[in-house]
Amino acid sequence: MYTETNLPEPTEHIFNNEELISQQEATVGQRFLNYLIDGLIMQYGLGLITGYLVVQLMVVVAPGTAYALFGTEGSSMFLLSTYLISIINFLLYYTFCEKIFRGY
């Protein structure tokens, strides 16, 4: 059994020197601009495009279901379907952005 005093030294470092990145904190203005860009692209751009495409696809595939889901604004099915589309958009957008910009 190993204790803190006699733990073996790791033979390999987790990070190479090339992988170590110096970071600096973003300013309040940079954070606000990032919030605005994400909000505009995510909520309006991506939300409108995917919402339109989902509704058009549903009308072609199953018009009765499309009307039941999206026909009556304010119904519980309308709200549930729009929340579901929003959650999927959120997951796809932020996963894509984190991958592309490597977390910056």
Image (cartoon, rainbow, N blue to C red):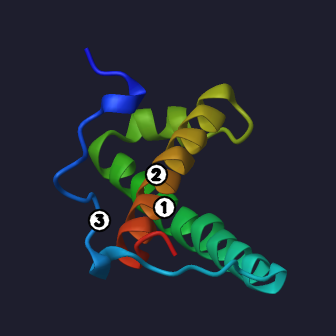
Whether residue 46 is situated above or below residue 17 in the rendered picture:
above
Left or right: residue 73 versus residue 59 is right
* Residue name at image x 64 percent, y 64 percent: 43
SS for dot 2? helix
Q: CA distance from mark 2 to mark 3?
A: 28 Å
* Residue name at image x 54 percent, y 38 percent: 81
Q: CA distance from mark 1 to mark 3?
A: 25 Å
Quarter of the rendering containing residue 71: top right
Whether residue 50 is situated above or below residue 63 in the rendered picture:
below
Q: Which mark is residue 91?
A: 2
Between 101 and 46, which is closer to the camera in this rendering? 101
Q: Which mark is residue 80?
A: none
How packed is label 3: few (under 14 Cα within 10 Å), some, or many (20 or more)?
few
Q: How many marks?
A: 3
Label 3, on which residue? 15
Mark toward the start of the polypeptide (1 vs 3): 3
Question: Residue 77: x and y, percent?
Answer: 59, 29
Q: Amino acid at mark 1?
A: Tyr
Q: Which mark is residue 94?
A: 1
Residue most extreme to the right: 28
Q: Amino acid at mark 2?
A: Leu
* Residue name at image x 48 percent, y 55 percent: 89
Quarter of the rendering containing residue 17: bottom left
Residue most extreme to the top: 1
**Closer to the observer: label 1 or label 3?**
3
